[in-house]
Image (cartoon, rainbow, N blue to C red):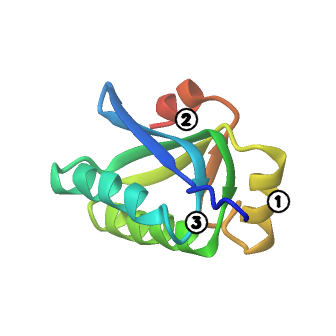
């Protein structure tokens, strides 16, 4: 009998100056993307439009996760904000590049503090 393992995603948030850093840990796929979406919507609902997504502990992101990030980016831009990405693994950099999201849509930083400082 095969045992099914449930994928989980942990999302944490902290504020640095006027920037919110949202850190993810785990896989972002169709089943976990709503967790990320809810956390990002909370930021937007609080009028926080300068976001850094720290993907250091995220090994995989599916199209569902990319959709959440793009929708969040569009909303922040309406309020003169932005979504910047930090600590992408080589695989995530390839994923974002392959679908044309980097460097055209998202700015990517090697370090969270560099991303925060870029605002």
Q: Specify the quadrant of the image occupied by residue 75.
A: bottom left
Q: Mark 1 points at which residue?
A: 94
User: Vertically, is 97 above or below 119?
Assistant: below
Q: Mark 3 points at which residue?
A: 29
Residue 6 screen position, x and y as percent: 56, 56
Residue at 31 percent of width and 58 percent of height: 38
Above or below, 23 against 8 in this view is: above
For the point 66% across and 68% down, which residue is it?
101
Name which of mark 2 and mark 3 comes first in the sequence.
3
Of badges 2 and 3, nearer the viewer stands 3
In the displayed structure, does residue 17 sit left or right of residue 109? left
- Whether 109 is drawn above or below 1: the answer is above
Q: Distance between the residues labelled 2 and 1?
A: 19 Å
Q: Which element carries disc 3, helix, strand or loop?
A: loop
Would you name the residue on which mark 2 appears? 115
Q: Which of 54 and 59 is in front in this view?
A: 59
Q: Residue at x 35, y 37 (%)?
A: 20
Q: First in sequence, mark 2 or 1: give its number.
A: 1
**Image quadrant occupied by the C terminus:** top left
């Amino acid at each position: 009998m095969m045992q099914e393992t449930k994928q989980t995603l942990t999302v944490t948030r902290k504020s640095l100056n006027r920037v919110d850093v949202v850190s993810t840990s785990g896989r972002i796929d169709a089943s976990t993307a709503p967790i990320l979406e809810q956390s990002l919507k909370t930021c937007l609902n609080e009028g926080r439009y300068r976001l850094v997504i720290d993907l250091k502990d995220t090994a995989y992101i599916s199209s569902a996760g990319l959709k959440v990030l793009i929708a969040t980016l569009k909303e922040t831009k309406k309020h003169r904000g932005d979504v910047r990405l930090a600590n992408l693994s080589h695989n995530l950099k390839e994923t974002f590049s392959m679908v044309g999201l980097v460097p055209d849509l998202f700015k990517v930083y090697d370090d969270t503090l560099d991303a925060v400082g870029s605002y």
